Image: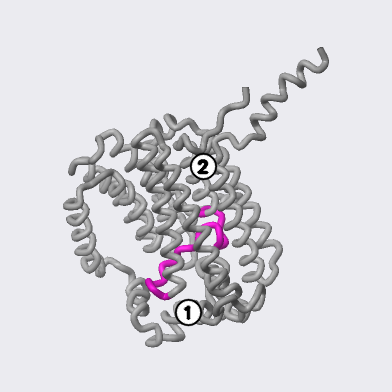
Amino acid sequence: MKGAPLSALMPILASSLRLGRLDPGVLILCLSIATIGLVILNSASEGNDGLVLRQASRLAIGFLALWVCAQIPPSWLERFAPHLYLLSLFPLVLVLLVGEGRGAERWLDLGLLRFQPSELAKFTVPLACAWLLARAGIPPGWGALLGCFAMILPPVLMIQLQPDLGTAILVGLAGLAVVFLAGLSWRRILLLAALGLAAIPASWPFLHEYQKMRIRTLFAPDADPLGHGWNTIQALTAVGSGGLTGKGFGQGTQAHLAFLPEHTTDFAFAVLAEEFGFVGVALSLLLYFALGLRILWLAMGAPSPFGRLLVGALGVSFLLHVSVNAAMVAGLIPVVGVPMPLLSYGGTIAVTMMASFGVAMSLSVRARRPRVP
């Protein structure tokens, strides 16, 4: 009789220790990239244990968020999608009123918690678009497409007003990813692409002066080497000096001699390139793209149109995020202030991105495991 309570608890304990709906591939890739990020942060911060421990604790919270989101019933996500979208607009409005940041209003400081509300929109915008298109039917008509654009536009405009053009673009692309995954005809895709290209020059008058200078600097960084061209020049110097195998851990001069700006955040990938060279960059990008493709593989295992659209958009959005940071560090696009996921220092992006991976697992039957009887 004494052993009965213990024997009754064993299945519960075993179930809690199982992966549940967690996908081992996603977990291993996330852990690998996060480990590389902590190594790079340790070097870039010159052994600042406090900074590394803070990032490690944020990553731990991210893994916890991943597990929690993986346990959410898929029907709940679809049911509350519009509510979550509307709730995510509130902090974006609030940050314009009382936000704080380095030359911009991008963060909300709640005392014990300081976070960037725009990161939430990278998840809630595709969530709302997937909900709408799944209800309207696939492929969508013009009415459903206009509804998606009506949901994409408000958060994008509010994020641009902070101002944060890089994140605004990524939020918009996350929503558009759902639209293009919904089975549009090539004629509509080409029409929307033409409208998007036409909107680029039309948006020029609405950009801030520093944003215009960053675009000009892309084509002639040497024109203002000590000003707007500084970031691009120093990042290219770091990448180029890494060579094939890099200078070695802790031996990068661009970050340690304070030439490379934001070397723990936006340009952490440049530190990796300088210290570990082409080999380190290639390995890291291989892990990143393997993770993105793994998410897309989970999307194909989602049993509902809503799940396939949302998980597919999350995978595409993640790959775009990685590509934008890598292209920025390589001087292929203007400096847009977009960090490298799981590698750059920062808590909000790490937690929200891993939470989105958990959602992908929740919606895909491929990530599920049978319960312990």
- 271 or 139, nearer to the observer: 139
330 is higher (above) or lower (below) than 132: below
x and y percentages locating residue 292 in the rendered image? 46, 53
Q: Residue at x 25, y 38 (%)?
A: 138
Say if residue 124 shows up in the picture: yes
Q: Is residue 333 magenta?
A: yes
Residue 172: image x %, image y %? 33, 54
Q: In the rendered structure, which segment of residues is drawn in magenta?
A: 331-349
Mark sitting on residue 236: 1
**Dot 1 or dot 2, earlier in sequence:** 1
Residue designated by label 2: 358
Which amino acid type is shown beneath numbered disc 2?
Gly
- Quarter placement of the C terminus: top right
Kind of residue at disc 1: Leu
Point out residue 53 in the picture as x, y percentages from the top left corner.
Answer: 68, 58
Which residue is at the far top? 1
Disc 1 element: helix
User: How far apart are the alpha carbons under marks 1 and 2?
Assistant: 35 Å
User: In the rendered image, which quarter contains the N terminus?
Assistant: top right
Residue at x 41%, y 71% (from the top left corner): 335
Picture quadrant of residue 219 = bottom left
